[in-house]
Image: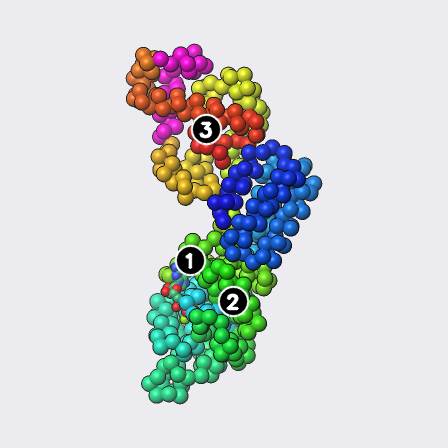
Amino acid sequence: LSARLTDTFAKLRTKGKLSAADVDGTVREIRRALLEADVALEVVKDFTGKVRERALGDEVNKALNPAQQVVQIVNDELIGILGGEQRRLEFAKTPPTVIMLAGLQGAGKTTLAGKLAKWLKDQGHTPLLVACDLQRPNAVTQLGVVAEQAGVAIYAPHPGNTGVEGDLTVGDPVRVARDGVAEARSKHHDFVIVDTAGRLGVDAELMKQAGDIRAAIDPDEVLFVIDAMIGQDAVATAQAFQEGVDFTGVVLTKLDGDARGGAALSIRGVTGKPILFASTGEGLGDFEPFHPDRMASRILDLGDVLTLIEQAQQAFDEEEARQVAEKIASDQFTLDDFLKQMQQLRGAGSIQKMMGMLPGMGKMKDQLANFDEREILHTEAIIQSMTPDERRNPKLLNGSRRLRIAKGSGQTVTDVNSLVNRFEQAAKMMKTVAKGGVPQIPGMGPV
Ligand code: GDP
Ligand code: MG
């Protein structure tokens, strides 16, 4: 998803004014990218419809930089679909607050029970974990381990209350849930987290069990836990659980994997239920409240493009950009201008920081590693060792002049050569900038 969208936006960013055809082309790409990421068709349609309408509207034509405005619209609409503001956990008026977890086997419910318990405990609450997964032989033990790690209490069936001597896996999960909540009330726990069983696929028996547990304990929140990597099945699974159990919120797990978050978009779009938490690893600390804006950037893989553009614009204020453009047009862009630009960029924050905000950073990691601030200092030293004539006209730089400059700046002739090459590349790139009007970082390729 991301590579394609990044390309699309890169194309957009090199344009000044947008035509209706540009907008349509972009919307088509967004649509295809979302479908490829397994976002449900109806969600995609709704989304692209809104983006198209706004992008063709007045707000873009009047915008200073229409391409940037379209990026902003896509981002806004994504945040909108993902729930806008962050939704917090509902607390019961009279404790305990009862939270029930539901979802397929392997989704991460038991792990989440521990994460949630630790998170609540860290805020001064006294959660009780209740083990209602009596399907899998080790499920109760697993919750016990998690409870110990989180340092919270657990209510689990034991021979006395499963009804079957010595067998933890047979028993009535509904009864365990009800007894667990009663236990929490009598022992003054202010939260109860009820872990339930899952199956590999949705099945009627499981759904009935979850529904019965829900009916028995009347939870304040029913959290549907779903693996973000689930892809195509996200919508069907979410709908089945919505009908079977009817959840109040969603938790996305395994966001530490490659999943871009297409599932998040689909589930939210189809069920309308808010995403409350994001789980990002196997450790109990790998957990956070869900931030729609962060997920939007993740889906777009835009990094913090807007901030980057703003910073770059501050560095190259428009008047200056125009002067540079004129110089380029008349072939008067000099090494002095090049130096000045580098210094301005440094003023806008370190290059590394700016690089960190670029989209598609994966590909550019090597470049990032090779590019550090010292290089700018070396560049400065080299340019400052040139005569004003040489700075204005790099064609003067023959072998003996380059040797003199290398010695004067404490760098090698190779360094001098590479700087002159980079300058020439940058000058070429600046010509593109002059045509497109979008700032770019010298030597770094398009933003
Ligand atoms: P349950 O069947 O729904 O209770 O799922 P579990 O909590 O037992 O988790 C299934 C597997 O997924 C376990 O190996 C967990 O360690 C792992 N897991 C759970 N949440 C995450 C997560 O956010 N990231 C990763 N990488 N693994 C997770
Ligand atoms: Mg489990």
Q: Position of residue 45 (x, y in %)?
A: 62, 54
Q: Which residue is mark 1?
A: 280
Marks 1 and 3, the one that precedes in the sequence = 1
Callout 1–callout 2 Cβ contact below 8 Å: no
> CA gap, disc 1 to disc 3?
36 Å
Q: Which residue is mark 2?
A: 237
Which numbered disc covers residue 412? Answer: none
Q: Which type of secondary structure does the marked residue at label 2 adopt?
A: helix
Marks 1 and 2, the one that precedes in the sequence = 2
* Residue 390 located within the stretch drawn in magenta: yes
Above/below status of 53 relative to 172: above
Q: Quadrant of ligand 2?
A: bottom left
Marks 3 and 2, the one that precedes in the sequence = 2
Which range of residues does the magenta coloring cover? Answer: 374-398
* Residue 267 located within the stretch drawn in magenta: no
Q: Is mark 1 within 8 Å of ligand 1?
A: yes
State the residue at coordinates (51%, 56%).
38
Q: Which residue is mark 3?
A: 442
For the residue pair 22 and 6, the one nearer the viewer reads as 22
State the residue at coordinates (51%, 17%).
331
